[in-house]
Image: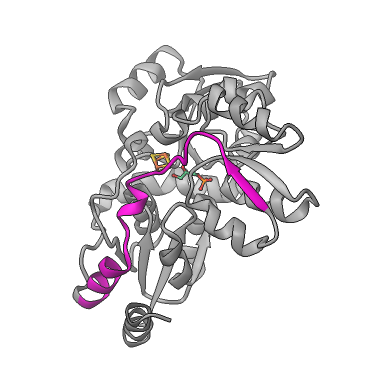
Amino acid sequence: MSDISDRIKQLKKEKNAVILAHYYVDGEVQQIADYVGDSFYLSKIAVKVPQQIVVFCGVSFMGESTKILNPDKTILMPDQNADCPMAHMVTVEEIQQVRKEYPSAAVVCYINSAAEIKAHADVCVTSSNALKIVSKLPNKEIFFIPDNNLGHYIASCLPEKTFLFHDGYCPVHKKITESSFLNLKAKYPDTKFLAHPECTADVLAHADYIGSTSGILDYTINHEDKEFIIGTEIGILYELQQKSPDKIFHFAGDLPACMDMKLITLEKIVTALETMEPQVHMDEKLRKAAELPLQKMLELAAD
Ligand code: 13P
Ligand code: SF4
């Protein structure tokens, strides 16, 4: 353990804090975290942990969701500038317009959205539970916001429903192009391709498996293959190698990296624990409105 890791351990003990990290943050941050996972797992774990202080190593919509579900806890974001561009791609006006035109449509909001957007949705989803949740909704018409790629993927699995899409997207997964995949596939023709549903449809068409970061990780653990082509952000490599040190992972798209996730560093975690800043603060009216679709997600995702 390095000095800085020891300092984090000591501060965590002193303050009785817990550290949560998404798979896309740097490996050294994942290494010192108490819990590492995908968006859905992290949103559930934040509610369960007994600690009152949560350091969230991820982007702002994740810290916000944690605050929405845990209003009495102190949520620290080591870098407030770590934000997801997709979280701001849809506007409240666009939602209101669709609600006017299609009053029976359910507004399904990808969790990668700011609290102001969630507050206007009927239900939130993550990439690991979207299919289950949308299939359970009684509404035939679905307005899926903002991720166009995830929305189309879910629609392709649920032909009995009618979808309206937004044009939001993840700039990192967009860089994983079909040609970058085909180049790799030419080199490793017998290797399975595992892709995140934030990838574009032309890329997903080649996937042997489509799933969230946890889904991809589980697939590599549970299948005997020794090599995989991965279609998601490079941060997941740390956990892929931790879980399967004997396996080889090739990344389509020239090492796609989410620079917002990479803003989280060990030094910033130390500062956050020492100063108790920056914290996530939220207007109570907004929090309550955004809590409803998040609670509905937790309810519908539970078996
Ligand atoms: P998951 O954690 O649900 O796989 O989503 C990936 C992502 O882009 C988070 O920002
Ligand atoms: Fe947002 Fe994409 Fe980064 Fe995830 S990988 S936080 S969707 S920009």
| Residue numbers of the magenta segment | 248-274
Q: Whole-percent x and y of residue 186?
A: 67, 27
Quadrant in the picture for residue 267:
bottom left
Q: Nearer the viewer, residue 179 or 70?
A: 179
Residue at 34%, 41% (x, y): give it: 84
Residue at far right of view? 224
Q: Is residue 201 left or right of residue 118?
A: right
Say if 126 sits above or below 29 in the image.
Answer: above
Q: Nearer the viewer, residue 288 or 61?
A: 61
Residue at 43%, 81% (x, y): give it: 1
Q: Whole-percent x and y of residue 284?
A: 26, 53
Residue at far top of view? 101
Q: Whole-percent x and y of residue 154?
A: 61, 28
Q: Whole-percent x and y of residue 303?
A: 69, 51
Q: Nearer the viewer, residue 145 or 95?
A: 145
**Ligand 2 rendered quadrant:** top left
Q: Is residue 144 visible?
A: yes
Q: Is residue 196 left or right of residue 26?
A: right
Quadrant in the picture for residue 89:
top left
